[in-house]
Image (cartoon, grey):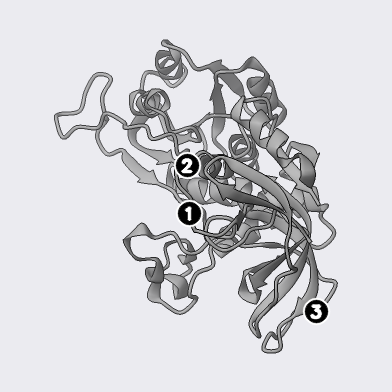
Amino acid sequence: MKALQLTGPGALELREVPVPEIGPADLLLRVGAAGICHSDLYVLQLPFQLRPDPLTLGHEIAGTIEAVGGAVDGRTVGERGLVYLCWSCGTCRECVSGNENVCLAAGRVAMPPCPGLGPDGGMAEYIRIPASSFVPIGDLEFAQAAPLADAALSSYHAIEGARPQLQPGSTAVVIGVGGLGHVAVQILTATTAARVIAVDIAAAKLELAARCGAAEGLLCESGTAQAILDRTGGRGAEAVFDFVGTDQTANLAVASVAPNGAYRMVGLGGGAPEITAGPAGGPGWPWGASVRKSYGGTKSDLLNSVALARSGRIRVEVERFDLADGRTALDRLDQGLIQGRAVLIP
């Protein structure tokens, strides 16, 4: 089969490799679509390899079951579905409590094995997956379904963790209207009564946010925090979702979140928000506000995301590429030229 593999730091090749062999608890999935995430770009740009042998990238995966392991019940050849990206143990106290994304087996790192970030991923014609990670999608188009595995999952999880703040009359700010952010705007408008303000550096991304249901869009610049305060009676937004995570966006969140509000860090830009233990007041961290680094999501979050997509309440803006054009798609993502989500079609 063909697979898009990382063969060294910054080196990406379309290679011919054997079709994976599956074990008794596995499925072989014929890939219908694989989304491209900033995490893939991050791995590609690392100055070292995650493992010594070539790694097939891709953790947003949808496809059709091609073969079923001998110990697997309830799955059949020909079923259509996507892959839950947290390959957790399923038996620890976190997993059985529904917190598979922070599985105890992953230790303090709390990142269970994820396809494309350790095990081989889905930018290929076939992938071996644990049967427990398969989530049916019905008749959803593969290119629409694949990005749900992260772009919707991670957005839904961040929003779910701030749901007590998202009451009628509240304001939610979405910083960064990319692959995750434009889906987050839709989830917020579909599942909460909050008014959504989108923030981005590009006017075209704010136009996308408006199509997704945002009440207003603001360019990210020096006066953006004050603009948010002006629109919230000086108090700030009850929830701020940062899908960029740079110093600029982190400090914007600190300056614009409301007392008792929620700041959710999702983007991996390495930003360090200025949060101190001093008295609250002025532009700094307000009383009662919480901050949380949000990783992936639970399987329940993914099931809810799929349900929203199947009902038509969220739809991913997709730019399609052939598997052989994966490097072009990643370069366009790096340059900020992708509207919504880039998806590879094997």
| Residue 107: image location, x then y, percent | 34, 65
Disc number placed over residue 118 in the picture, else none:
none
As helix, strand or loop, the secondary structure at mark 2 comes to loop
Disc number placed over residue 46 in the picture, else none:
2
Which of pointers 2 and 3 indicates the residue nearer the eye?
Answer: 2
Question: As drawn, which residue projects farthest toward the top?
Answer: 223
Q: Earlier in the sequence, mark 3 or mark 1?
A: 1
Going by the numbered disc 1, the residue's amino acid type is Leu
| Residue 228: image location, x then y, percent | 45, 19
Task: Identify residue for label 3.
Answer: 76
Residue 241 or 279: which is nearer the viewer? 241
Neighbor class of circle 2 (other Cα within 10 Å; few <14, some 14-19, many 20+) is: few
Neighbor class of circle 3 (other Cα within 10 Å; few <14, some 14-19, many 20+) is: some
Q: Is there a contact, CB below 8 Å, between mark 1 and mark 2? A: yes
Going by the numbered disc 2, the residue's amino acid type is Leu
As helix, strand or loop, the secondary structure at mark 3 comes to loop
State the residue at coordinates (39%, 39%): 262
Residue 319 or 234: which is nearer the viewer? 319
Which quadrant holds the N terminus?
Answer: bottom right
Q: Is residue 220 above or below residue 95?
A: above
Task: Identify residue for label 1.
Answer: 50
How far is disc 2 from disc 3 in space, using C-alphas?
39 Å
Which of pointers 3 and 1 indicates the residue nearer the eye?
Answer: 1
Going by the numbered disc 3, the residue's amino acid type is Thr
Q: In screen coordinates, is 273 left or right of 148?
A: left
User: Residue 237, can we see it?
Assistant: yes
State the residue at coordinates (37%, 18%): 234
How far is disc 3 from disc 1 in space, using C-alphas?
33 Å
Q: Is there a contact, CB below 8 Å, between mark 2 and mark 3? A: no
Residue 12 or 76: which is nearer the viewer? 12
Neighbor class of circle 1 (other Cα within 10 Å; few <14, some 14-19, many 20+) is: some
